[in-house]
Image (cartoon, rainbow, N blue to C red):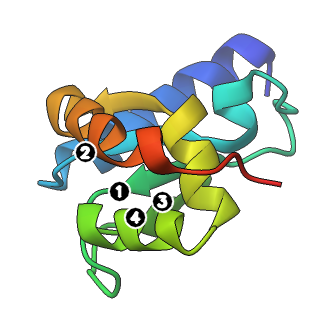
């Protein structure tokens, strides 16, 4: 598959995934957010603002991590690297206002991850 066709297929898959959920926020994290991904090998990592255990659509190259705002805040206070890096460098795809509110509440007191 050519690069253009691959990107189009990934965007279509991501659009279908986002259309099928009603989350507080959906944030692009990982190598895609850092723009250091391998187009052929990397999946699309998303932080989805829903409680853990939520059942949502499956997508081939999308790797969702389901956490509520409360779970993220708790994890940050416990020193969880994933939550801290996500808040600092994640790119909101939906729910920008709740995401920015969460960042404003949690990050000022959060230590930098290791």
Residue 72: assigned label = 4
Report the side of 90 relative to 100 (left or right): right
Report the side of 30 relative to 49 (left or right): right
Determine which quarter of the picture holds residue 41.
top right
Q: Is 27 in front, or is 5?
A: 27
Q: Are marks 1 and 2 in contact (CB under 8 Å)?
A: yes
Residues under labels 2 and 4: Cα distance?
12 Å
Mark positioned earlier in the residue sequence (1 or 2): 2
Quarter of the figure that contains the N terminus: top right
Circle 4 or circle 3, nearest the eye: 4
Residue 59: assigned label = 3
Mark positioned earlier in the residue sequence (4 or 3): 3
Above or below, comparing residue 53 to residue 44 in the picture: below
Image coordinates for residue 17, horizontal then vertical, percent: 33, 49
Residue 25: assigned label = 2
Q: Residues within 10 Å of mark 4 (few under 14, many from 20)?
A: many
- Any part of residue 60 in sight: no
Image coordinates for residue 33, horizontal then vertical, percent: 63, 29
Residues under labels 1 and 4: Cα distance?
11 Å
Residue 36: assigned label = none
Q: Are marks 1 and 4 in contact (CB under 8 Å)?
A: no
Above or below, comparing residue 104 to residue 41 in the picture: above
Circle 3 or circle 2, nearest the eye: 2
Circle 3 or circle 1, nearest the eye: 1
Residues under labels 3 and 1: Cα distance?
14 Å
Circle 2 or circle 4, nearest the eye: 4
Q: Residues within 10 Å of mark 3 (few under 14, many from 20)?
A: some
């Amino acid at each position: 598959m050519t690069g253009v066709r691959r990107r189009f297929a990934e965007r279509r898959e991501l659009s279908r995934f986002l259309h099928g959920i009603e989350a507080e926020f959906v944030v692009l994290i990982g190598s895609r957010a850092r723009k250091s991904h391998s187009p052929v090998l990397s999946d699309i990592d998303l932080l989805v603002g829903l409680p853990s255990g939520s059942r949502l659509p499956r997508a081939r190259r999308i790797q969702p991590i389901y956490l509520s705002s409360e779970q993220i805040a708790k994890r940050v206070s416990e020193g969880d690297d994933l939550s801290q890096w996500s808040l600092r460098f994640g790119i909101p795809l939906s729910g920008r206002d709740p995401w920015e509110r969460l960042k404003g509440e949690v990050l000022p007191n959060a230590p930098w991850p290791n």
